[in-house]
């Protein structure tokens, strides 16, 4: 596909989402303890929670730092709430595997050539924290 038509397609795809929704999702990705490799793998297959958390997450190059199972799952659940991830479903219901949503694919394309997401600054971290509080008030 020529570069020009690819760029037009990407602009059209990003236009499907409100700018503040994309910004919140980008900030959530930058604040999460994950590397781009995890999302690249999620683009092609479901990735199990146990492969992401703890020592396995470090070994698989999915984490920026060692995190527990509960912290990892909470981070993944937040990324589901902002619209970048979804849980994988099999014939018996929801599994412990995660995949990218269409918005997740768009955001991954933005950073696919890097090993880590851009570092979140203090303002990004505060904005991400505030968004989590705002959404959790309605649950």
Image: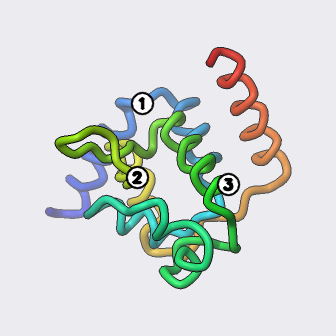
The Cα–Cα distance between marks 1 and 2, rounded to whole angstroms, is 27 Å
Residue under the point 72% across and 23% down: 134
- Residue 78, horizontal then vertical, whole percent: 58, 41
Q: How far across and how far down the image is residue 11, in percent? A: 35, 43
What number is the disc on residue 17? 1
| Residue 58 in view of the camera | yes
Q: Which residue is mark 2?
A: 96
Indicate whether 34 appears above or below 94: below
Label 2, label 3: how far apart the Cα atoms are: 15 Å
Most distant residue in the top direction = 138
Q: Earlier in the sequence, mark 2 or mark 3?
A: 3
Name the residue rendered at 52%, 38% in the picture: 22
- Please name the residue shown 42% across and 58% down the image: 108
Where 117 falls versus 76 (above or below)?
below
Task: Provide the secondary structure element on which disc 1 rests.
Answer: loop
Left or right of residue 116: residue 106? left
């Amino acid at each position: 596909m020529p570069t020009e038509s690819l760029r037009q397609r990407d602009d059209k795809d990003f236009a499907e989402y409100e700018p503040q929704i994309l910004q919140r999702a980008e900030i959530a990705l930058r604040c999460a303890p994950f590397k781009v490799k995890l999302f690249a793998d999620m683009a092609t297959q479901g990735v199990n929670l146990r492969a992401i958390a703890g020592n396995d997450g470090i070994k698989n190059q999915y984490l920026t730092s060692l995190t527990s199972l509960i912290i990892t799952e909470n981070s993944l659940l937040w990324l589901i709430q902002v619209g970048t991830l979804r849980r994988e479903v099999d014939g018996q219901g929801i599994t412990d595997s995660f995949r990218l949503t269409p918005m997740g694919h768009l955001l991954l394309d933005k950073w696919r050539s890097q090993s880590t997401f851009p570092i979140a600054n203090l303002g990004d971290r505060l904005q991400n924290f505030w968004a989590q509080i705002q959404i959790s008030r309605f649950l």
